Image: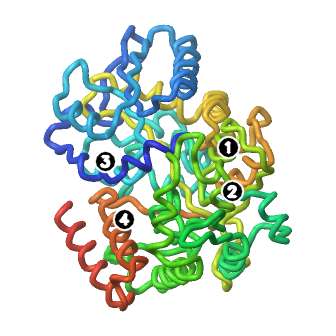
């Protein structure tokens, strides 16, 4: 599950990544002069830390080293973007040559600051047509203003995980496809108990783990920025419509304070005590890893997965969802960029490597070939997320020079809306949009 630490660390990473372009004085793209056929040791830094994840990385590295006996890879795991930032600034032999980051929100800064090398020249001289290798949406979140400073390394798709036993008890025979069905089912599945709940249909508040503003907004197919590059929050009705629908669902399920009090009883998102595992919620907005985690936790009920519902007037687009993922790039200050490219190319484009990694950590593959590979282990629950990843209307949040700051600004506004601190949503979106434009102008 690549999504966990990336998501929980996103806010910290946005603040931390401030690598100055002047600190990145290495070679660039086609100008890299090192000989990839000479003996060399590369430093690879990544963020995974769970034993199964680390084992999966090491297995891929072993396969790479067997195919490239002159290249040795020194792997350092559990690295945050903050630590990466500090090392890139310092430079030297101990700094990473190749980096894998969970924080796609940081790509705009990685590219804009010059911290990572543009991979377009490497792709070109290797004869790799990125548009034929990677899904379009994944290319969107791994580049900025034409600078392909990262490539996708596995993919996360977000959908709905639900308790089939609870559905059956409530007389519900299939997952909701529209938002109105979702709201209806959430109420039917809710079992109040005084000022708390024996079971909640879904936790609709934006602090409910993966139920974030951008995940829900994706179902409305929003446009975050206009053609002129300025914030589109006030102009695109998708944002106001999503916030209004979410706030209405919060009210129908008992109100913000009551829901937040119940949420305080939830176990850790990445433990066996997750509220979905414990039957505290019947539906959960989540990534492709949740069903496998629930099975590992020993749940006794039957599970189902489905795409998230869409607005009632977008039923034809049902099946879409929010996409994100892990990214991989080459440090601009590295003196071993050609050798580093061999590693990046293998990890991100080799079908066997991508499929093996996806199978090991229950993530969605990040190449078109891997998505169709017969070696990909596909359970019925997992297939849902593969279909979401393939859906032409699935979308993501665009890269910007301020990294993901604009998303955090929007998120803070969404928090205020659901709490009831904002009564005029259109006016609030206009003000939030102006703040985003100011932040991005300062970051350039």
Residue at numbered disc 4? 407
Q: Is residue 261 left or right of residue 399?
A: right
Q: Few, some or many C-alpha atoms within 10 Å of disc 2 (few <14, some 14-19, many ≥20)?
A: many
Quote the CA–CA distance across marks 2 and 3.
28 Å
Residue at numbered disc 1? 294
Residue at numbered disc 2? 161
**Can residue 431 be seen in the rendering of this structure?**
yes
- Establish if 336 lies above or below 86: above
Q: What element does badge 4 sit on?
A: helix
Quote the CA–CA distance across marks 3 and 4.
13 Å
Quote the CA–CA distance across marks 3 and 1.
28 Å
Which label's residue is closer to the chain start, 2 or 1?
2
Residue at numbered disc 3? 13
Q: What element does badge 1 sit on?
A: helix
- In this orientation, which residue lies closer to the viewer: 70 or 74? 74
Quote the CA–CA distance across marks 4 and 1.
29 Å
Of the two numbered discs 2 and 4 in the rendering, the one whose residue sits closer to the viewer? 2
Q: Are marks 3 and 4 in contact (CB under 8 Å)?
A: no
Percent of width and height locating residue 67: 57, 14
Residue depicted at x 57% and y 44%: 273
């Amino acid at each position: 599950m690549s999504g966990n630490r990336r998501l929980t660390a996103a806010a910290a990473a946005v603040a931390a990544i401030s690598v100055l372009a002047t600190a990145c004085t290495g070679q660039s793209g086609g100008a890299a002069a090192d000989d990839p056929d000479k003996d060399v040791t590369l430093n690879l830094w990544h963020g995974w830390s769970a034993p199964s994840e680390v084992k999966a990385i090491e297995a891929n590295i072993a396969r790479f080293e067997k195919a490239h006996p002159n290249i040795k890879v020194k792997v350092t795991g559990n690295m945050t973007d903050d630590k990466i930032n500090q090392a890139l600034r310092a430079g030297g032999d101990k700094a990473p040559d190749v980096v894998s980051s969970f924080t796609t929100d940081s790509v705009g800064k990685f590219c804009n600051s010059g911290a990572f090398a543009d991979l377009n020249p490497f792709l070109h001289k290797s004869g790799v047509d990125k548009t034929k290798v990677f899904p379009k949406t994944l290319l969107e979140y791994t580049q900025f203003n034409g600078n392909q400073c990262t490539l996708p390394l596995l993919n996360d798709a977000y959908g709905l995980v639900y308790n089939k036993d609870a559905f059956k008890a409530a007389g519900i025979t299939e997952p909701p496809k529209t938002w109105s069905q979702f709201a209806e089912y959430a109420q039917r599945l809710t079992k109040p108990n005084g000022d708390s709940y024996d079971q909640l249909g879904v936790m609709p508040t934006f602090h409910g783990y993966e139920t974030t503003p951008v995940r829900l907004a994706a179902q409305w197919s929003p446009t975050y920025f206009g053609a002129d590059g300025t914030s589109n929050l006030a102009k695109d009705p998708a944002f106001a419509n999503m916030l209004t629908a979410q706030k209405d669902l919060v009210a129908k399920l008992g109100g913000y304070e009551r829901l937040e009090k119940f949420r305080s009883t939830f176990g850790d998102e990445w433990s066996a005590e997750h509220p979905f595992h414990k039957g505290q919620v019947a539906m959960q907005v989540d990534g492709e890893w949740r069903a496998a985690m629930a099975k590992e936790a020993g749940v006794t009920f039957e599970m189902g997965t489905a795409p998230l519902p869409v607005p009632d007037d977008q039923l034809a687009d049902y099946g879409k969802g929010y996409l994100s993922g892990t990214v991989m790039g080459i440090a601009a200050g590295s003196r071993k960029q050609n050798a580093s490219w061999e590693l990046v190319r293998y990890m991100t484009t080799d079908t066997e490597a991508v499929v093996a990694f996806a199978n090991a950590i229950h993530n969605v593959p990040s190449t078109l070939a891997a998505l169709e590979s017969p070696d990909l282990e596909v359970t019925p629950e997992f297939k849902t997320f593969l279909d979401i990843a393939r859906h032409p209307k699935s979308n993501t949040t665009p890269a910007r020079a301020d990294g993901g700051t604009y998303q955090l600004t929007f998120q803070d506004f969404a928090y205020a809306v659901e709490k009831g601190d904002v009564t005029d949503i259109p006016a609030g979106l206009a003000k939030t949009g102006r703040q985003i434009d100011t932040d991005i102008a300062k970051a350039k």
